[in-house]
Amino acid sequence: MHIRRTSSVARLRLSSSGDGPLSPMLQAARRPKLEKLWDLVDEYLHNDTESIMRSMADHFEYTLARNKWNLAPQSLFQAAAYSLRDRMIEWWNDTQEYFYDQDSKRAYYMSIEFLMGRTLTNALISTGLLSPYYEALKEFGENLETIADLEHDAGLGSGGLGRLAACFLDSLATLNYPAWGYGIRYKYGQFKQNIVRGYQVETPDFWLESGNPWEIPRQDIVYKVGMYGSVQYVTRSDGSLAVKWEPGHCVGAVAYDTPIPGFNTKNTLSLRLWSSKPLVDMNPEELKADPWDMLRQNQADEEITSVLYPKADSDSGKELRLKQQYFFSCATLQDIIRRFKKSNRPFAEFPDKVAIQLNDTHPTVSVPELMRILVDEESLPWDQAWAITTKTFGFTNHTVLPEALEKWSVPMFAHLLPRHMQIVFEINHRFLEEVKVKFDCSPEVISRLSIIEESNPQQIRMANLAIVGSHTVNGVARIHSEILQQSVFADWHRLWPGKIINITNGVTPRRWLYCCNPTLSSAVTKQLGGNAWVTDLSLLKDLRSHITQEFLRDVREANKVAKERLRKYVSKLTNGAVDLDTSSLFDTQVKRIHEYKRQLMNILGVIHRYQCLKALTPTERSQQVKRTHIFAGKAAASYQQAKAVIKLINTVADVVNSDPQTKDFLTVVFLPNYSVSLAELIVPATDLSEHISTAGTEASGTSNMKFAMNAGLIIGTLDGANVEIVEACGQENHFIFGATAPEVDKLRAERQSVAIDQRLYNVLISIERGDFGASSNYRWLIDPLWQGNDYYCVAHDFPLYLEAQQCVDADWRTPDVWAHKTVLTMFGMGTFSSDHSIHQYARNIWNIKPARMPTEHITTV
Ligand code: 26V
C-alpha cells in the first residue's frame, strides 16, 4: 500500500500575496470551478529525505513502470532526475509568473549549440537538495556518485561556443536575470569518438536512447515553420501594396523545455529546444499526393532536427544546415513575439522588452525573419521595422578563421526562403546607399562591406548581415576583439566606431570548481569562512596577499585526490594496461583537434622528450621529471590533418608506454570521446595545461580558465584569453612562449621559411623512419613542415616551446615554487567567472536587470 503525501506546505502564489496585480492568465486560472485544483497545485513538494524517497519511488513505479523484477541501475538515476525535475518545475513556474508580473525585459540567447553535459549533481547543488538526495539514495542502498555517473551527457554542441552557452545559462539563472536559452533539440548530438588501432572512428551519439528525464515536451507549444514557395503581392484595404510569402511547405516546431536552476536562488530559467515534426494538415496539397511520397516527406521533416551540423559536402547537406537555422530562428521569434504580445504593447516598445543575442552567425536569419514579421505581417513601415530590429539584436563573434565565417549561396537561400532573400537584398541596398551618402568609401571598401559577395554564384555573408542587423557586436577576449576591430571587421570599425566591443568569456565556477573539485572547494570555503565565493568569485583575490601553509597543503591534497580519481578512470578504461603515476606531472591538452590549436607541436615535443630520455643513462634518466601527457579531443569527421594528429598521438602512446627504458618516466594517453563529464574529471587532476594556439587564432579558449581556476598552471601563447589570464595571475606564474600575433602576421607576410631546429629535425626524421608506424599516415602533417609551408608556425615556435617546457620542469622540481604559483593562479581567476561576463552582457548589450523572486513564501523542508 502506498502512503500518499499527507501534509503539504501551502504555496502562496506571488501575485496573491500582494506582489502586484493578478496576471490575466492567473485571473483566468482562478475561476471558481477549478479552485480545488489550484489549491493542490499551489502546494510545494516537500524536500525532506522521506518525501524525496517517496517521490523517487512514485516515479520509479508510475513514470518508468519499473518493479523489483526489472530494476535497471539507470532507472534509479531516472527516478531521481524526474523527482528533482518536479521540484524545479514548481520554481520554474513561479519564476515565469514573477517575470510576467514584474513586466521584466528579457534576454534571449539563441545558439545552435548548448553543450550541457550532465545535469544531476549540478542541479542538486544549485537547488540545495544534494544532502536529502544523498540520504535518500543511501536509504535505498545506493550511492549518489554511482547514480550520477549513469547519466548520459547532453552533447548538443561541438566545443567552446556550445559550452559557453551552457555556462551563460547557469550564470543567468544564478544572477536572477530574466532570460531564456533557445536552440535545437538534436536527436543525435556530437558523434561518439572511438579509437580503433589509433584512428578516430565516429559513431552516432543517440543520447535520447534511454529517455531524457530533464526535458518537458510541450506538445501544446507547436509553431508552423514555412519554407520554399513564392512571394505574392496583395492590395490592402487602404489601397497600399503588401507582400505575402506563400510557403510551399510547412513543418511543425515542438518545444522541449529544460529547467535551468540558479545556484542559491529559487529563480529557475528555461532552455527551450525545438524539435521538428510533420504538419500534414498544413500542407493540403501534399494530402492528395501518393501516400508513400507523403511518408518520405514526413521523414524529411523529422530529419530537420536529427543531427548537429549535418554534412555540408553536398547541396542538400548545405540546404539542411540552412533549414535548421531558419527552423529554430522562426520558431523562437514566434515564441518571443507571442510572449511580447501578452503585454499589449505597441511594437515600437519591442526592444524595451526584448533583447536577442545571436551566438555566432548561425541564428542570423532571424534578422530578415523579424523584418518579415514586422513589415509583412504586422504592416509596419520598413524604417520603423528596421529600427526595432537593430535595437533588438546583439551579435557575438567566436572565430576569426575565414573558413568558419558562414556564407550561403544566393540561389539556395532564395529557393528555400524567397521572401527573406528579397529582404536581405533590400537591407543590403539601403545599407550601401547610406554608406555611400554618409561616408566616403572606396568601391573596394563598399564591396567588402556588402552583405552580398559578388562571386559566382553570389553569396550571402552572414557575419555582415549580423553586424548590420545588430546594435552591438562583441568579441570574446580582449585580443580577439582587437583583431576584429583592426583586421577582420576593420571596415566596420571605421564605419561605426564603438559598435564592436569586447566581453571576455568566462566559465561557471559552480560546475568547473564547486562541483567538479569538492576537495579544493572545501579548502577555499574554509579559507574564506563561507561559500559566498561560489557566486562572487572576485572574493578569491582577497586571498592573494596572505597565502597560508595550510592552504598550500590543502591544494596539494586536492590535486592528489583528483589525480587518483583520474588514475582509476584510466585504469578501468584500459583494462589495467595503463596505470598513471600520480606523482608525475600531469600535462594536459584537451580540446577540439585543429591545426591552429597545434596538438601537433605538443606531440612533437613529447617525441623529443622521449628521444632525450632514450639518450640518457639509467641514472641520468632517474633524475628527470616524471611526466604524464594527456590528450583528448575530437576531430571533425572530414578533417584529415586533425585525424592524422590523433593517429600520431595514439601511436606515440603505444611506443612510449611500452618502452621499458622510458615507461617509468614518460606516459602518453589519449582519452577517447572527450566530453563535458570527461573534462570534469581531467581538469582538477591537471598540473599543467596546454593552450598553445598560433597567436591570433584562438578567439578566447575557455578551458584555460577552467584549469587555472582549479589551480593548474598554463603553458601557452599570447593568444585568446591567455593574455588576460596571465595578466591577472602574473605572467611569471605561467609558461608563455612563441610568436605574438603581430609577429605571426609578419612571418606570414614575409613568407620566410623558418630553418628547422635540430631537435625538430630529429623528431621529424624519426617519424619519417617509421618509428611510429607507417610515415604515410602522417604525410598531411610532416610534408608541410619540410616544405616550409607552415601556416600555423609550428617550426618557428617549436624551440621556444621546448624552452618553456624546460622552465616547467625546473619549477616542478621545486615543489614550493610550484605550489605558490598554483595558488596565485587560482586566486587571480576572480574575473573569469561567467557571472562577470553575464553582468557585462546585461549592462552593456541587453539592458536587463535582475529580478529575484522573493522566497519567504517557500518553506519546503
Ligand atoms: C563554425 C562552423 C563552421 C562549419 C561547420 C561547423 C561549425 C561549427 C562551429 C563554428 C563556429 C565555431 C566557433 C567556436 O566554437 N568558437 C570558439 O568559441 C569559444 C567561445 O567563445 C572560444 O572560447 C574559442 O576560442 C572559439 O574557438
Image (cartoon, rainbow, N blue to C red):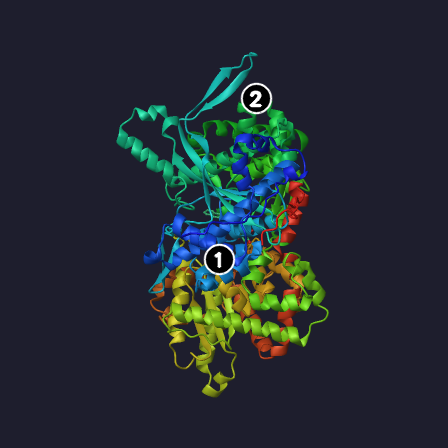
Question: Residue at left 44%, top 44%?
Answer: 185
Amino acid beneath label 2: Ser
Residue at disc 1, secondary structure: helix
Q: Please state the horizontal and vertical placement of residue 559, each as a whole percent of the image.
A: 55, 71
Residue indicated by mark 1: 676
Q: Is mark 1 within 8 Å of ligand 1?
A: no
Question: Residue at left 52%, top 60%?
Answer: 793
Question: Residue at left 59%, top 36%?
Answer: 468
Residue 704's place in the image compared with 247, above or below, is below
**What is the crowding at mark 1: few (fewer than 14 residues within 10 Å), some, or many (at least 20)?**
some
For residue 575, the mark is: none
Residue 212 visible in the snapshot:
yes
Q: Which image quarter is the C terminus in?
A: bottom right
Residue 723: quarter of image: bottom right
Residue 493's place in the image compared with 599, above or below, is above
Amino acid beneath label 1: Val
Residue indicated by mark 2: 379
Q: Please state the horizontal and vertical placement of residue 244, each as a whole percent of the image.
A: 48, 21
- Taking the image as shown, residue 574 lies to the left or right of residue 605, namely left
Residue 275's place in the image compared with 343, above or below, is below
Distance from the alpha carbon under mark 1 to that under mark 2: 46 Å
- Outermost residue toward the bottom? 619
Q: Please state the horizontal and vertical placement of residue 454, each as a whole percent of the image.
A: 50, 34
Question: Residue at left 63%, top 35%?
Answer: 353
Residue 734 visible in the snapshot:
no
